[in-house]
Image (cartoon, helix red, strand yellow):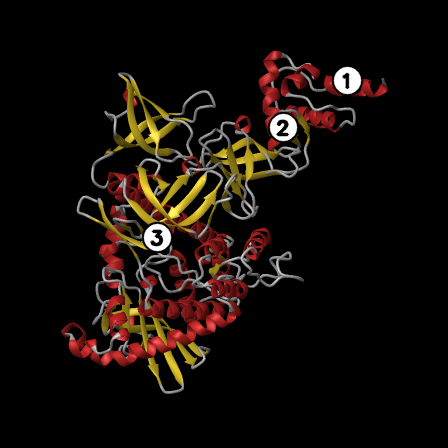
Amino acid sequence: MEDRNKRDNKLNKYGTGSAGTAENRDKRKKVICDLVKDPLYVPMKEKELAMFLQVAKEDREELRRVLQELLAEGQLMLTARGKYMKSNGKVLTGTFISNTRGFGFVEIEGRQEDLYIPEDKTGGAFHKDIVEVALLPGHEGKRQEAQVVRIIARGITEIVGTFEQARDNYGFVIPDNLKLPQDIFVPKERSRGAVSGHKVVVELTDYGTRDKNPEGRVVEILGHINDPGVDIMSIVRGYELPVEFSEKIMNQVARVSHEVSEADRAGRRDLRDMVCVTIDGEDAKDLDDAVSVSFDGQRYLLGVHIADVTNYVQENSVLDREALKRGTSVYLVDRVIPMLPHALSNGICSLNAGEDRLALSCLMTVDLAGEITDYEICESVIRVDRRMSYTAVKNMLEDETLVERQEEYRQYRELLPMFQEMAQLAAALRRKRKKRGSIDFDFPECKIYLDKDGHPTDIRPYERNVATDIIEDFMLAANETVAQHFYWLELPFVYRVHDVPDAERIQKLSAFINNFGYYMKAVGRAGAKVSDQEIHPKEIQKLLTRIEGTPEEPMISRLALRSMKQAKYSVECTGHFGLACQYYCHFTSPIRRYPDLQIHRIIKEQLRGRLGEERHAHYRDILPEVAKHSSETERRADEAERETDKLKKVEYMEGHVGECFDGVISGVTSWGIYVELPNTVEGLVHVSRLEGDYFYYNEKACEMVGEATGKSYKLGMPVRVCIDACDRFNRTIDMSLE
């Protein structure tokens, strides 16, 4: 009875009337906190708390605000049934990712698994909102559930979609983003005259609720869904990729010199007499790397010369701020959205043959074993001798008689010995990387060919060759050398890092490959637990070597790739797992990647002796955000590139509906099997289309199994499929087994 009296005294202290001062609200918070901490307290819903605390009806909204604040502060938490109880202290901030079925997830930085948000616990959060969540108790053995308690910031203000006229006085915009579960309501007076089939950009004016559609107003009509280029532009706008450069930026670019002056050359190493070439694709225009090689019989002198873009993009200028905002150039199927204006990237910053150009050069001495025994990093001025293509270099190296037989190659006759030395040096560098355990996933990429109206006419896989390998090996060597140099100088820097895979994923991979008689080094017997401390990239490399040429190679290679983490930028040099190296950065592409541009500034300041404590402090302050933002813009660009590729692949396959092709199973899920064709197009054979038996998904073996017949479909298995249907809106291809 005494305990009950004490508790009653607490509720009497809650008080009534308006919120008044912050002090009154703090007192009310204390009353609620004291109550839930009481040993006799039984979790209650908001309405029950209001009745128990004798809160007047006019003060119920104030009680709700107090409870929401206590949730946001981490002092209270909610049970699965919406009852308030003492918090376990776990209130987290993350990004809300919606699902078309109403529920969602919250991505928490540094947390391996996302939080699951039930449909009735989203708190009005919209896709990409930054939210605070309170963890819900229970759910042992399942994904951790949480409730959104506060929306910190809206992540999306505009949406791209297809306008549909519903009535004379309103319409709806169907979002292109399939994660958005509701159409956007648009009153007629806010439609800008859009008609059904128009692709539009709609600005959100109301984010809606579970029972009410979001509302918005059309701010731009991109064109009709069938107009050339509108499909790609819809993706560009959907990912908020900046396209045009402002007049202010273009005015700044117009003032940049088009020639290298005597003043520009002052204080730089003059390497114009060194024979160097660029080797790129036939259609490349922004040539930011050149290479040179000489050999004295014992050692190679490898020069990697990178355009000095920072000479023309001054720190914190309007051009620099725009480059940072973009983060990277974006290479879409029908266009390039550059990080820097073409007047720079294709002009004075491009290492065009026969023209003086400013560069940062990494000059490396390499022995016959591929070991870099000495190096120098310097500011230089170079003059490229020849602009070579991958195809030309490949053809010359594979058939050197071409230089005598064909006129187009005779002009390169004097360069052939250097190309041969390049191939020998690249092979030595590659052997050294392989020896230490560098992983080389060789999955086919593709080139999609379009006609003048943007319709796909052909899809062909890219082929790696000796020329592409030469450039890749040389760039990797320069990136490692520069990263190692600045790591030991202990200067602020931006590194490219690739973390060790999660132990759980490696364990699953290890268990799976045991079914085929393969193993990775583990504690005790084969297939024993593999921890992230125990796994070494060399083990994965060995696995890829052992499966080469086997029927299970595609399957195991894909699973190994999926067990990897995503590389990112960081101010901490934590190593690159995939390359099996401790020091790595991106130094070689300042025209198209901002991190490269950023570290070029640091390199030049260090070379010029200008990195005093003030500049140290400056870089320590700005680089963490540069690294984070660059990682985010890189992921955005990758996603946009994949979406445009998927769109054009679906459009291309529309012309092949009813035809049958050989393919390989590239994925197995509970809803069906994915099949990849030789041209890299992928489609789904839904489980309902697997005839002749009832099929179920065996997750452990990653296969679809027939219950009666035992027939199974596994990753990597060759199959023959027919194209049944193509859906451009959802970017999917439906297949069936022949």
Between marks 2 and 3, how big is the CA–CA gap? 46 Å
Which residue lies most toward the right here?
2
What amino acid type is highlighted by mark number 2? Ala
**Residue 80: numbered disc:** 2
In which quadrant of the rendered image does the C terminus lie? top left
Residue 271 seen from this side: no
Q: Which residue is mark 1?
A: 8
Which residue lies most toward the left here?
407
Q: Residues within 10 Å of mark 1 (few under 14, many from 20)?
A: some
What amino acid type is highlighted by mark number 3? Ala
Q: Residues within 10 Å of mark 2 (few under 14, many from 20)?
A: some
Label 2 vs 3, first from the N-terminus: 2
SS category of the residue bearing label 1: helix
- Work out whether residue 157 or residue 257 is closer to the camera in this orientation and state it: 157
> Residue 119 placed where, x, y %?
52, 28
Between marks 2 and 1, how big is the CA–CA gap? 27 Å
Which residue lies most toward the front here?
709
Q: Which residue is mark 3?
A: 323
Residue 324 seen from this side: yes
